[in-house]
Image (cartoon, rainbow, N blue to C red):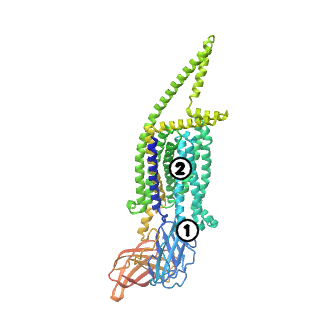
Amino acid sequence: MTQTIAPRVRTLVLLLLAAACALLAGAGPASAHAALTGSDPREGAVVDKAPAQVSLTFSESVSMDDDSLRVLDPKGKRVDDGKPSGTGGTTYSVKLHAGLPDGTYTVTYQVVSADSHPVSGAYTFSVGAPSETSVTVSGQGAGGGFVGGLYGVGRYVSYAGFAVLVGGAAFVLACWPRGSGVRVVQRFVVSGWLSLTAATLLLLLLRGSYTGSGKVADVFDLGLLGEVLQTKAGAALVSRLLLLAAAALFIAVLFGAYDKRKDEEKRDLTFGLAVGGSVVAVGLAATWAMSEHASVGLQAGLAMPVDVVHLIAVATWLGGLTALLVALYRGPADTPVPGLAVSRFSRVAFTSVIALVVTGTYQSWRQLGSWTAFTDTRYGQLLLVKIGLVAVLVGVAYFSRRWTAQLAAATPVAGASAARRAEKGAGKASTKAGTKAASKTSGNTSTKAASKTASKASANAGTEASGNAKVAEKASGTAKGTGGSPRAAQLARQRAAVDAARQKRQRDADPNRFGLRRSVLAEAGIAVVLLVVTTVLTQTEPGRTEEEAKAAGTSSVGNSAPATGAVTLDMPFDTGSQNGKGVVRVELDPARVGANDLHLYVERPDGTAFDIPEVKVALTQKAKNIGPLPVAPDHITTGHWSASGVQIPMAGDWEVAVTVRTSDIDQVTISKNTQIG
C-alpha cells in the first residue's frame, strides 16, 4: 500500500509547486493602492501662463519627502522648490520657480500610500504650446526590480509562516494535545516561527529601498532604516518582532513543560496556553491589519478587527490542515493521529470557514464597491478566483469529513479488538508460565505457594510482551551494557526497525486512514494555491480605488496617458472690494466641436477654494461672429461650478469670458482666448 501512496504524493506535490510558482510568477510587483485622481494643471493641458504651483490629488492620504514630487523643464532641469505640502486632505502641491518659459513640463511623483505600498508615475503639461522634451516618463515605477521582487518573496513567506505557526499550535492545543510530543509536529510549528521571523527581518531591512530608490546598497543604510522605523509600516514590523519573541516562549512551554505533563495535568496548562497563544496570534494579525488595506478607506475602525478575525481564521484552517497532513504522512507509527483528533479539527475547520465567509463578504463589499468591479478590475478577478478555490476546498473537505466519521467509528472497534487480543495473549502466557512453575515446585510445597509463583511468572510474561520495539531496544541496551557482541546489538536494532515498519504497514493498510490522507493532501494542495492568491490580493489595488481612478480619467497605476485635448485656463480677477481678489480656473473637456463638459473653480490667491455670489460664462468666436453663447454652470461644492453638454458649433479661436461677482455691486469680467476643435 505504501508503494502506491508515494508516487501519488510526489505527483501531487509537484503539481502544487508548479501552480504556486505560476501564480508567483504572474504576481509582478505590488500595484499602487493610492491612485492619482486629479492634478492641476491636468495631464496634457496647455495653459497660457506658467502656474505658480503643481497640485496632485490622490484617492487616499500619502506620505512624501522633498524628492517625492518633482517638476522638470524640457531639458530635464528641476524647476520646483523641493518642498511638497498638503493643501487639504488628499491634495499635495509644490511651488514652481517664477518666470518659467513656454514649453512642455514633466511632473513625476513617488509617494507611499497609507496602506504602505509605493506609488509612482509621471505626466506632462505645457505652457504656451507643447515642445520637445528630453525627459523620459515611460518605465516610471516603484516597488520593482530586484529589491521589489525580494520584498514580494518576503511577504509570501511571512504569510505562510504565520499560517503554519498559528495553525500548527492551534491544532496541537485544540485537537491533539499528545501531538506536542511528536517530533515532526514540533519541527513543523518551529519552522513556521523561524520563517515568519526571518521574513519580518528581511522586510524591515528592505523597506527603505523598496519605497525609495530600489537600490540594493540602500538596504544597509542605517539612516534610511531609522526613517523606516518612524513610519506606520516600520512600527508594524517592529511590533511583529516583539510578538514573535513572546511566541518563542509560548513554543518552548508547549513543547517542553506541557509535553511532559500527564494527561490530567495538561488541562490546567491548556487553558493558560490557549489564552496566551490567542493574545499573541491576535497581536501578530493586527500588525498586518494596522498597515495594510484595512487601515485606510471606508470604516477603518471596523475593518481592522474584521481583518484580524479573517487572518486568524485562515491560519487556523490552512495551518491546522497542513499540520494534520504532516502528522498523517510523517508521524511515527507508534503515535498515529487518533480519529478523535481528526474529528475535533473538522469542527474547528468548519468554524473557521464560517468566519471566513462572513468576514470575506464584508471585505469584498468594502474593497469593490460595485458588482461590475468583480469583472472589470484585477482585484475583482482575483477575488473570483479566491472564491472559487474556497468553494472547491469546502467540497474536498466534505469528503474528508466522511472519512473522519468512518475513522472515528472504526477506532473504538479496533481498540477493543486490540485489547481483547492483548488480554487473550496475556492469559495464555500466564497459564503457560503458571504450569511450568508448578511442575518445578516440590511435592511438599503448598498449593498457595505454587499459586503465588504462577502469578509472579504471569506478571513477568506480561512485561516481556509489552511491545516488540521496546523489547528490542532493551535488548540492544543490555547487549551494550553487559559487553555483549556488536552483532547482538545490531540484530536488536534490526528487529526494532522491522517491528516499526510492520506497525506502519498495518497503520497505512487501514482504508479509512488511507482515504483520509488522500483527501487531506488534496485539501492542503488547494490551500497552498489559495494562500498564494490571498497574498497577491493584499498587493493588488482595490477595485473601488481602481474604478475611482478610471472615473477621474487617470490611470490607476500612474503611467502617462495620451492627452485628452482638454483646455485649462487660469484667469486672475480683482473686483476692487475686500476679499475681491482670486483666480478663476476654467476647464473645458474635450475642447472639441459638439458637447463639452465645463468645470469652473474659484480660488483665493493662497490657493484655497471659496464661494462667490455669482459666476457666469460666455463663449464667443469673433471671426465668425458667433456668440456670445451664455453658459450658466451649477454650483457643486465650495469654489466649484460645473455645466455639462456645453455645445460648441465649430472649431476655431474662441474667447472664454467669465463674469465674477463678489458682492451686490462689485463684479468684473475677465476673458482668454483658446483654440477649440
Disc 1 marks a residue whose amino acid type is: Gly
Disc 2 marks a residue whose amino acid type is: Val
Q: Residue drawn at (41%, 78%), measured in percent from left and top?
A: 566
Tag 2, which secondary structure?
A: helix
In the image shown, does 449 or 264 lie closer to the viewer? Answer: 449
Side (left or right) of 22 relative to 209: left
Q: Quadrant of the N terminus?
A: top left
Tag 1, which secondary structure?
A: loop
Tag of residue 164: 2
The percent coordinates of residue 99 (x first, y second) are 53, 85
Q: Residue drawn at (48%, 44%), measured in percent from left and top?
A: 348
- Toward the bottom, the furthest residue is 623
Q: Quadrant of the C terminus?
A: bottom left
Residue 674 higher or lower than 161, as above or below: below
Q: How many residues crowd around disc 1 within 10 Å: few (fewer than 14), some, or many (20 or more)?
A: many
The percent coordinates of residue 392 (x first, y second) are 40, 50
Residue 390 higher or lower than 515, as above or below: below
Asked if the residues shown at circle 1 and circle 2 are in contact, with their CB atoms under 8 angstroms apart, the answer is no
Q: How many residues crowd around disc 2 within 10 Å: few (fewer than 14), some, or many (20 or more)?
A: many
Residue 63 higher or lower than 286, as above or below: below
In the image shown, does 540 or 501 lie closer to the viewer? Answer: 501
Tag of residue 214: 1
Tag of residue 242: none
In the image shown, does 578 or 194 lie closer to the viewer? Answer: 194
